[in-house]
Amino acid sequence: MPILVPLFIVVPLVELAVIIRVGQVLGLVPTLALLLSVSIVGAWLAKREGLGVYRRFREQVGSGRVPAAEIVDGVLVIVAAALLLTPGFVTDGVALLLLVPPVRAAVRGWLRRLAGRRARLSLGLWGSAADRLWKHSKRRDRPGRASSREVPMSPEPQLGDENGREP
């Protein structure tokens, strides 16, 4: 989290500098109108993309597949919407880019590679302990315990309704 502190300092300063520069070039009223119009268009686009991600999420769940890409897309759309709430041209530009599906797919791939790298690093640090636990769990089955090839039986169903109450 040490990167958040500089971001909370640097991003507002950059936004302020860009707004001042655009205001010098365009003037006050056109700059404010541009900021407002980008926010309105961005909010509409965020809603449209968010609903599309939600629809794809429901289709994946309905077909029995894990909606991993849709979950990441949903988070990226939420991040884009939050950036659109921040006044400024730089955050609006980043937000609008996150709302474009090919850009979102590229960011999703980058996040997947980053997570994979961190997982490998974590396994590298803890790998020997994890290997010992894995080998220990693969030893021959102990008496009185179900083997990995056996499926334990579930208890017999009780009389009554689905909450277990008597009729």
Image (spheres, rainbow, N blue to C red):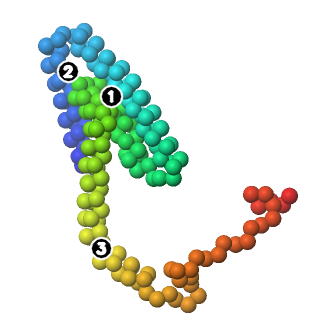
- Indicate the amino acid at tag 1: Leu
Image x and y of residue 112, in percent: 30, 53
Residue shown at the point (23%, 14%) measured from the top left: 31
Residue situated in front as seen by the camera: 74 or 100 = 100
Mark 2 lies on a secondary structure that is helix
User: Which dot, 2 or 3, sits closer to the camera?
Assistant: 3
CA distance separating discs 2 and 3: 50 Å
x and y percentages locating residue 79 in the rendered image: 35, 37
Disc number lying in front (1 or 2)? 1
Q: Position of residue 80 (x, y in %)?
A: 33, 34
Q: Which residue is labeled 2 in the image?
A: 19
Q: Which residue is mark 3?
A: 127
Q: Amino acid at mark 3?
A: Gly
Q: Mark 1 — residue?
A: 84
Which residue lies at the image location 26% right of the left edge and 43% below the top edge?
Answer: 106
Q: CA distance from mark 1 to mark 2?
A: 15 Å
